[in-house]
Amino acid sequence: MAQSFALRHEVVATSELARPEYRANPVNRCYYCKDELYSTLTAIASARAIDVVLDGNNADDRGDYRPGRKAAREHGVRSPLDEVGLTKAEIRELSRAAGMATWDEPASACLSSRIPYDHEITDEKLRMVEQAEDALRALGFRVCRVRHHDTLARLELGQNEIARALDEGVRDQILSALRAVGYRQVAVDLQGYRMGSLNEGIVLRPV
């Protein structure tokens, strides 16, 4: 995508897993993740005389519990899409009109969001989730989340894809693929994918 718009693109290394408060996975885990990210980016920006660091938050993100926003404020990070009140649907339409191939790509959240709060985040768990979701996409599932519950994988799929997952032939392929990753049991969440499901049951508070 960066190449198609002739943008300078650079991969920056961060060390979230080196931070014990991040690995502990409290309900404000996202704060520690973004603090690590923004500390790195603002240092680079300062060294290169770049005035501001931006993120991609939009108006729809205001309704979910996002402790990372606190880190953004602390580091002076700005959210231009949110500042002008653009919603996800409006951004998709503008992207489509601009000819961007990714205009209708499914949302893609941090892999750590697949692990329940207060369960330790490890590289092994993240790799299991990543491999499992790659396997589901290879089987043709477009919207999918693999929620990690130790040896059980709980699948959140798009509402229009749940029935296909329960078809005997596809079901067997899913079981085989996820067992190869390391899961012993696989469950399909009949509610399907919904934004913010990790935060269900916690008390939301301003950040």
Image (tube, helix red, strand yellow):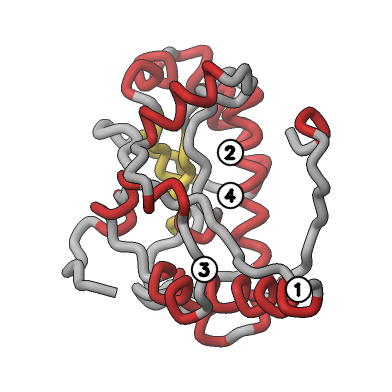
Question: Crowdedness of circle 1 by 10 Å Cα count: few (<14), some, many (20+)?
Answer: few
At a point 58% along the width and 38% down the height, the residue shown is 133
Q: Disc 3, disc 1: CB below 8 Å? A: no
Note whether 151 is above or below 68 in the view shown: above
- Between the residue at mark 4 and the residue at mark 1, the CA separation in whole angstroms equals 38 Å
Given the image, on which type of amino acid does mark 1 rest? Ala
Q: Is residue 21 depicted above or below 37 in this figure?
A: below
At horizontal 39% and vertical 63% (from top left) the residue drawn is: 116
Spatial CA distance of label 4 from label 3 is: 29 Å
Measured Cα–Cα span from mark 4 to mark 2? 6 Å
Disc 3 marks a residue whose amino acid type is Val
Which amino acid type is marked by label 4?
A: Val
Q: Answer whether labels 4 and 2 touch (C-beta < 8 Å).
A: yes
Indicate which label's residue lies in the foreground, 4 or 3.
3
Identified at 22% across, 72% down, the residue is: 206
Disc 4 designates what residue?
Answer: 129
Residue 41 at x, y percent in the picture? 68, 71
| Residue that mark 1 sits on | 49
Residue at the disc numbered 2? 133
Q: Position of residue 178 (x, y in %)?
A: 59, 38
How many angstroms separate mark 1 from mark 2 (CA)? 39 Å
Do the residues bearing badges 1 and 2 touch, measured as CB atoms within 8 Å? no
| Residue under pointer 3 | 77
Q: State the CA–CA distance, disc 3 to disc 1.
A: 15 Å
The answer to whether 187 appears left or right of 100 in the picture is left
CA distance for labels 3 and 2: 31 Å
Q: Exactly how many numbered labels are in the figure?
A: 4
Which of the two residues, 66 or 90, is positioned nearer the viewer here? 90
Q: Residues within 10 Å of mark 4 (few under 14, many from 20)?
A: many
